[in-house]
Structures are given as C-alpha cells and as structure tokens.
Image (cartoon, rainbow, N blue to C red):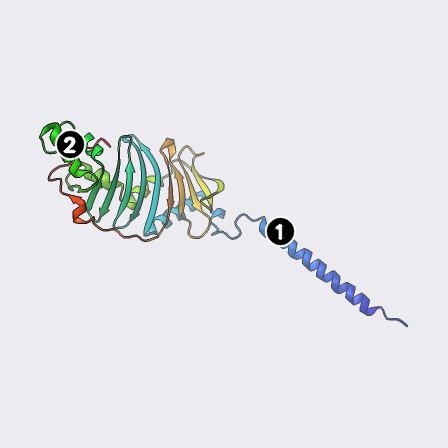
C-alpha cells in the first residue's frame, strides 16, 4: 500500500509557509499605514501638548540658527542669526540697510559699510564737522566693528536680535485656540503643524523625528516667516580683533532701522 502521509505533510508545511507570509505582509501593511510609525510620537498628542513639548525643547537647546523675516510696527527685518546663551552673531537687513551684529556677553558690536554710516549722520556729521566730516567718519567706520555703548538708544534694540530666549519667545508665540494642522516635510525633516486658530494666529511646524524642535514658524497677521535649525549645535563667540574695531568715541548716530 502506498502511503500519502509525506505528501500531505509537505502540502501542510507549504500552506503554513504561505499563510505565514501573507500574515506577515498584512501586518507590515498595517504598520505602514500608521503615520506615526518611526516618529517621535508627538503627532499623536493634542495641539496644546505639541506646543508645550516644542517650547520646552527650544528653551532647553543651547543654540539655534534662526533665519527669515520678521515684520512689526517698527518695520521689516530679515535676520540670519546664530544664537546661544552668551550672545549671538549674524546679519540684519532692514528696508534701508544691511549690517552685521555681534554680542558677546554684554558687549555689543555693529558692523556696516560707509553708506550705512553716511545715512545715519542725520546731517550733523559723525565728528560734528559737516559733510566733509560725515564722509571722513563714514570711511573710518566702513567695514569695521563699532562697539555700541550700553547707554546708547540703539543698544537695547540691537541686543534684542541677539537674545535667544527673548527672540524665540516672540517668534514661537501662537495666538488664539491652538489646533493641529497638516503634516509636511521641511528640509528633509517630517513635521506636524500646529495653528493659532485656523492659522490667523500663526503656524508652527514641529519636528516628528528626534527631539520635537520647532522647524518653521509663520507669524500671525502677516508677521513674517522664519526657519529654525542647528538646534544645540555649538559655535564660538569672540570679540572682534582690535585692528578690526573702531571706537566711535560717543553716542552712535541715530539709526533709521
């Protein structure tokens, strides 16, 4: 008598393999449908919780690179700043001018070209000597770092561009009830967006990979858009060399911003 047992067992084994493979594929398909698979999980949180996590991450970071445009009643400024707890360095562009700003501790420096300083003389001349004095002073200041006196009216306004906590507090604030928005990918980083209201109170994109840092923010009311990167990446701040620094010798000309 011929035994069919080996063939039956073989078929059962083959069937088990096929069913196991189908089950595995089915489970893989389900995992692939989960938008939070492989993320830091904040996409599952409420908008308020995401906002809290993002702000906490920003506060704890030792440094950040902020770039973009801020618009307020005082004017429009395009910033490209690296900030840490000790100060900041970078460039600021207003409607009229572009200048570099550097702060190391409480020491604040401004660097601009001769055209900037000529425009800021307000018709008085840097040395009080008229147009010839204006031109001469502007040439001396051209491309040099000028230390801004702490009691100069310009000091407080310029320092605000170099203060990490102050700048981020204003940039990251959303107004109105916070709601969740769409998912996106910014500079290769997957993000989840939270909105102030329906977006009129601002929009903040938060990283879905790694630490939930803010990646981009659009301020409410057309207040500008900035990107935030290099969180926690250290950089060196140092006073400019003496031969690259000029002592203005008094209060700076009134800046037009």
* Element at label 1: helix
Which residue occupies the extreme right position in the image? Answer: 1
Q: Residues within 10 Å of mark 2 (few under 14, many from 20)?
A: some
x, y percent for residue 3: 86, 71
Give the image location of residue 240, x and y in percent.
20, 48
Spatial CA distance of label 2 from label 1 is 72 Å
Residue where numbered disc 2 is placed: 135
Res 25 → quadrant: bottom right
Give the vertical position of 96 relative to 79 (above or below): above
Q: Which mark is residue 47?
A: none
Q: Name the one closer to the observer, 124 or 72.
A: 124
Quarter occupied by residue 176: top left
List x then y, in percent, for residue 133.
Answer: 11, 31
Residue indicated by mark 1: 29
Task: Tell which tag, 2 or 1, sits nearer the viewer.
Answer: 2
- The answer to which of marks 2 and 1 sits earlier in the sequence is 1
Is residue 124 something one can see in this rendering?
A: no
């Amino acid at each position: 008598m011929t035994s069919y047992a080996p063939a039956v067992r073989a078929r059962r084994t083959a069937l088990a393999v096929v069913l196991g493979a189908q089950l595995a594929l089915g489970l893989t398909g389900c995992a692939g449908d989960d938008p939070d698979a492989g993320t830091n999980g904040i996409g599952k949180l409420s908008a308020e919780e995401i906002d809290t996590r993002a702000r906490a991450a920003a506060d704890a970071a030792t440094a950040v690179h902020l770039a973009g445009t801020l618009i307020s009643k005082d004017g429009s400024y395009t910033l490209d700043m690296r900030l840490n707890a000790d100060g900041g360095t970078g460039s600021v562009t207003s409607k009229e001018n572009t200048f570099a700003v550097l702060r190391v501790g409480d020491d604040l420096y401004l660097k601009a070209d001769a055209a900037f300083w000529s425009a800021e003389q307000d018709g008085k001349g840097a040395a009080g000597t008229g147009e010839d004095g204006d031109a001469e002073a502007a040439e001396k200041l051209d491309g040099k770092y000028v230390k801004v006196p702490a009691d100069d009216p310009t000091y407080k306004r310029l320092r605000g561009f170099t203060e990490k906590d102050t700048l981020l507090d204003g940039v990251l604030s959303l107004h109105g009830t916070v709601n969740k928005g769409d998912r996106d990918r910014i500079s290769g980083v997957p993000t989840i967006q939270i909105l102030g209201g329906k977006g009129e109170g601002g929009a903040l994109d938060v990283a879905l990979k790694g630490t939930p840092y803010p990646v981009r923010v659009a301020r409410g009311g057309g207040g500008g858009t900035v990107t935030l990167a290099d969180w926690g990446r250290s950089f060196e701040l140092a006073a400019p060399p003496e031969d690259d620094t000029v002592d203005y010798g008094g209060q700076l000309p009134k800046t037009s911003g």
